[in-house]
Image (spheres, rainbow, N blue to C red):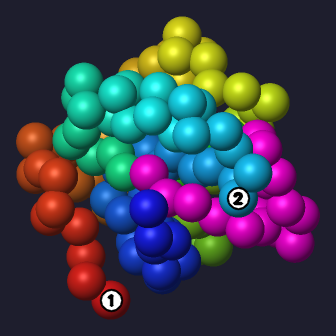
Amino acid sequence: DEAVNPKQVVHNEEHGAVVLWWGPKTPASEVEAMRAFYNESPNSMFGTPVGTIDGKSLGSKVAVTAWTGDVSKYQTGGYYGEGHVAVCPTFDEGAFKKFRDAYRGEGPEGIPTTANDPGMGPNG
């Protein structure tokens, strides 16, 4: 229910996390649906409210993000991987599942999903 520090978000994504976001006007029923989705398979995932992304308010929208990359190339020759963002008017479990399954555990640092149990994220 409290916004996560952006530095922690980025570091968790670097480790392969998928992040669920909701805006300040997202209905409680949507947030609860996202919590249920998270609870089904929480490794390498977390959720956080957010006021703005890239200076734009999510309002009542939801989003999901991830950062992927080739571990063997990471931080070499200006390579830092690729960010992925999907902003949606409402939570769509099927779409979020496809996003999660495509990108979770694919962070540029190569941390396996099994090493990212809930509560094991970086603290800083």
- Which of the two labelled residues, at mark 1 and mark 2, occupies the earlier sequence position? 2
Which residue is labeled 2 in the image? 24
2 drawn magenta: no
Which quarter of the rendering shows the N terminus?
bottom left
User: Residue 82 location, x and y as percent?
Assistant: 62, 51
Which is more toward the observer, 123 or 69? 123
Q: Nearer the viewer, residue 75 or 121?
A: 121
Which-is-in-front pick, marks 1 and 2? Answer: 2
Q: Which residue is mark 1?
A: 124
x and y percent of residue 52 in the render? Answer: 77, 67
The region drawn magenta spans: 47-61
- Dot 2 lies on which element? loop
Judge the density around disc 2: few (<14), some (14-19), many (≥20) Cα neighbours within 10 Å: some
Residue in view at x 49 percent, y 58 percent = 48
Which quadrant would the C terminus be assigned to in this image?
bottom left
Q: Is residue 77 left or right of residue 12?
A: right
What amino acid is at disc 1? Gly
What residue appears at the point 51 percent right and 71 percent down from the top-left corner? 3
| Residue 90: percent from left, percent from top | 71, 27
Q: Is residue 59 magenta?
A: yes
Q: Give the residue type at disc 2.
A: Pro
- Specify few, some or many for label 1: CA neighbours under 10 Å numbering under 14, 14-19, or 20 or more: few
